[in-house]
Image (tube, helix red, strand yellow):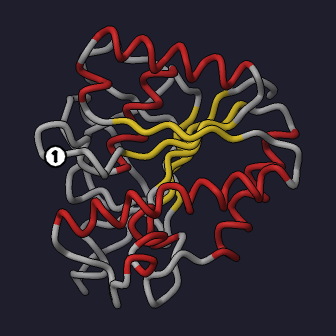
């Protein structure tokens, strides 16, 4: 299964400890598994969160900040620290990584969309692993993608990926957020009723290992994927 392109998304909670700080051991475990896939011939893209977590203590904050400017400043510090972790770990396996920062404008403007696709394709052909994050330092509501679940789906659509995998610390798909709703039930079987476009994933969908997406935006739907937004026939 060589040359298959897989887009991975990993959230902040999967990269941090109970204090909200970047966990170097968790990050090392993830990059080690990516390296194994890379050596098997897969093309890989990683959409990662964690820049704020990596940077907020360097600016003297006692806990993760809540104000937008404080978050953006923390991201500015943390982006370099986060990519340094990835770069150092991957280079131990002889793998080059590349930092790519995107905003919603990169997907809306045709020229920027094509330029991003071409640059990423060169990186993949050269056997590098692009590490993508939203450019939180400059993003405002008008140009924010929204979250990295959405960003990873858009990147998968941009590159016509074979597989999109969302890495998470939530044990599957639930009828509601299990951290907020004690009545949330795990969904063992998912039946797709229709495809439609949404700016972001519905609240129903908690981050999970989910393969064979279908992204329907202003680009063609690739039939090998299932659904970007979907309805459930029943939760069992």
* Rendered position, 178 above or below 4: below
Q: Quadrant of the N terminus?
A: top right
- Vertical order, 220 against 211 (above or below): above
Q: In the rendered view, does 175 fall on the left or right side of 38? A: left
Tell me which residue sits at (33%, 9%) in the image: 111
**What residue is at 51 percent from the left and 21 percent from the top?**
159
Whole-percent x and y of residue 123?
Answer: 66, 24
Question: How many residues crowd around disc 1 within 10 Å: few (fewer than 14), some, or many (20 or more)?
Answer: some
Disc 1 designates what residue?
Answer: 140
Please identify the residue farthest to the front as the structure is shown. Answer: 59
Residue nearest the observer in this picture, 65 or 153:
65
| Percent position of residue 162, x then y | 59, 27
- Which quadrant does the C terminus fall into? bottom left
Name the residue located 45 percent from the left edge and 20 percent from the top edge: 116
| Left or right of 223 on screen, residue 22 | right
Residue 98 quadrant: top right
Instruction: Report x, y in % for residue 216.
Output: 29, 24
- 37 above or below 127? below
Q: Position of residue 31 (x, y in %)?
A: 72, 57
Q: Is residue 170 visible?
A: no
Q: Is residue 9 visible?
A: yes
Q: Front-most of 146 and 68?
A: 68
SS at circle 1: loop
Query: In the picture provided, is 91 more to the left or to the right than 181?
Result: right
Most distant residue in the left direction: 142
Res. 219 image quadrant: top left
Q: Is residue 231 toward the left or the right of residue 157 in the image?
A: left
């Amino acid at each position: 299964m060589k040359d298959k392109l897989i887009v991975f998304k990993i959230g902040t909670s999967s990269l941090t400890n109970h204090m909200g700080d970047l966990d170097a051991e968790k990050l090392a475990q993830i990059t080690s598994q990516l390296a194994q896939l890379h050596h098997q011939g897969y093309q890989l893209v990683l959409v990662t969160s964690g820049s704020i977590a990596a940077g907020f203590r360097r600016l003297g904050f006692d806990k993760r900040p809540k104000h937008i400017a404080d978050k953006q400043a923390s991201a500015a510090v943390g982006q370099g620290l986060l990519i340094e972790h990835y770069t150092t770990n991957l280079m131990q396996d002889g793998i080059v990584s590349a930092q790519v920062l995107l905003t919603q404008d990169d997907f809306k403007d045709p020229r920027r969309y094509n330029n991003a696709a071409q640059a990423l394709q060169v990186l993949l052909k050269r056997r590098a692993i692009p590490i993508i994050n939203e450019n939180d330092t400059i993003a405002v509501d008008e140009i924010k993608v929204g979250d990295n679940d959405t960003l990873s789906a858009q990147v998968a659509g941009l590159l016509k990926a074979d597989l999109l995998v969302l890495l998470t610390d939530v044990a599957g798909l639930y009828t509601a957020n299990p951290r907020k709703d004690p009545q949330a039930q795990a969904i063992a079987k998912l039946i797709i009723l229709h495809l439609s476009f949404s700016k972001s994933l519905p609240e129903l969908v908690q981050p999970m290992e989910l393969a064979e997406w279908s992204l329907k935006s202003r680009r063609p739907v690739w039939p090998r994927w299932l659904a970007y937004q979907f309805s459930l026939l029943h939760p069992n």
